[in-house]
Amino acid sequence: MCGIVGLYSKSPAVGEQLGAHLARMLVQMSGRGPDSAGVAIYRDPLPAGESKLSLHANGPVDWTAVEARLAAGLGVAAAEVLAERHARFTVSAEAEEAERWVERELPELHVMSAGRAIEIYKEALAPEAFAERFALDRLRGSHALGHTRMATESRVTTEGSHPFSTGLDLCLVHNGSLSNHNRLRRMLRREGISIRTENDSEVAAGYLTWRLREGASLEQALEGCLVDLDGFFTFAVGTADGFAVLRDPIACKPAVMAETDEWVAMASEYRALAVLPGAERARVWEPEPARVYSWGRGSHDAGDRESLSGCGAARPAEATPA
Amino acid sequence: MTVAEGVELVDLAAGGLRELNARLHAAAGEGGAPRAWRIVNPGGRHNVAVGLDAAVDVEVEGHVGYYCAGMNQRATVRVRGNAGVGVAENMMSGTVVVHGDASQSAGATARGGLLVVHGNASARCAISLKGADVVVRGSIGHMGAFMAQRGRLVVCGDAGDSLGDSLYEARVYVRGEVAGLGADCVEKELREEHLAELRALLLDAGIEGVDAAGFRRYGSARTLYSFKVDDAGSYA
């Protein structure tokens, strides 16, 4: 099981309500994943020289003291404690440097995400309780991914929850299960990729991190998943300016996509899309197996587009609901 | 919203799915129960109109989730939208029509009746078919008619990879391109009796403007039916 949702705003009205829409989508996927929930939300991108860190503590933590340490080491422009063990800091350093600094100086903390736009919140809570705890409905943003987890391969913990960071401003959510994650984990650790849990999805995230580090484009890294990962998956990958979707060739795990003039969205099931404004008039289709779909406004390999790519002409054109 | 006289309108916007299904189930035994139903705002819910066993006519306005009209007997269920996984799964009789697309495993294990998909159907369409007819106006995904035992699958568009893998006695007709045939599935001659069968199926499905002569027929080569001692090495 597990549920995935993704929402990309094409209008200010949807962006203003991004967190509220995302929360409603997540709650629809409660049955698919009651064990834990998480989101990656992309918003208020920072200028060069600044970055955001989403931090999590496994035990009791004094966030005031953490802020003081960060201020002395990197410079802090903003701080917000979101829940007892979750906080977000805007620091005066590039994300890569900031993440390394925290790992070195504050090893008791876990950097859940680092980047100019990304923020990751996740917890071992049912989706509704999660959305309430993190007050998702107050969050604006450009795009977001969410996940509801039904644990199969590893323990129900915050760290085993999705999304997983796969690099700066990158993250992964996964529905499915991988069979060769132990061997891959050993290989990735030898390659210097940090993997913290016994979770199979974290290995998939680590695989993407590794491929991107070795110079692959996001699309190439995702296509590599089709070769190197053994198991079932529907992936959604968040990037600084959009998101991508990939299903394994057997495609046992569901996925549905929809688009209107206001938004683009994906979910494990249509009922998570039905709560979006204008869903009944959306173009709705099922992504084909083994095919990378992506949206983005710009930078990485998405070119200068704000629409769907990788999408065959014949099927989606015929897929308009009656 | 106007509804014709004698049509029972049910709005699922606020829930009430179990109550709706219970009322539809009761329709079999009650002389005075409505024969025509219109369901609005299904919102992608699972199990809409499952387990019916009455000659009722159910029209659903919008997209439905999993297993819509599953185990159907005698009823006619029309979905004016898309259907999720397993529409008309294990149907016994009656008619199910999807005006949009159908997701995976449409008509899985269905034993009787007719499933019509006017859009596309995705992977594993008519998997393990056991006697029903499935007619798709568009294309289907991979593994169509996997292990299908009896019944007919008609695809007016293209079929994805591994069509008819491990097929038994079901017949498969495809008009467009077939990406690849599965194990033990072969193309067979399209004879006059098959043309007549196809014309009747297209007529029943209400699909016009599609010439039966444009189809190719596929069936089982019947080499996987039983274990042969010479093949023992293949199972090691």
Image (cartoon, coloured by chain):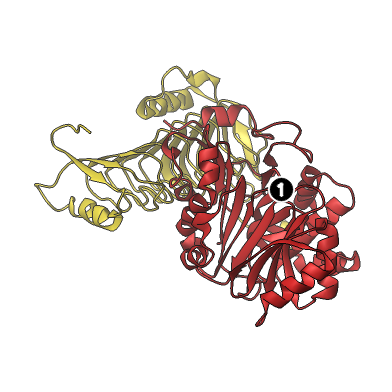
Chain colours: A red, B yellow
Residue B110's place in the image compared with A185, above or below, is: above
Binning the other alpha carbons within 10 Å of mark 1 as few (below 14), some (14 to 19) or many (20 upward) gives many
Residue that extends furthest to the left in the rendered view of this protein: B32
Of the 4 image quadrants, the one containing the N terminus of chain A is bottom right
Secondary structure at numbered mark 1: strand
The image shows residue B138 at horizontal and vertical percentages of 51, 29
In the rendered image, residue A169, in percent from the top left (x then y), is placed at 74, 52
Between residues A39 and A95, which one lies in front from this camera angle?
A95
Residue in front for this viewpoint, B175 or A285: A285
Q: Is residue A204 visible?
A: no
What residue type is disc 1 on?
Thr
**Residue position marked by numbered label 1 in the rendering:** A239
Q: Residue at left 32%, top 48%?
A: B72
Q: Position of residue B207 (x, y in %)?
A: 41, 24
Q: Residue at x 41, y 47 (%)?
A: B44
Query: Where is residue B159, by image quadrant?
Result: top right
Q: Is residue B120 above or below residue A251?
A: above
The x, y position of residue B205, in whole percent, is 38, 29
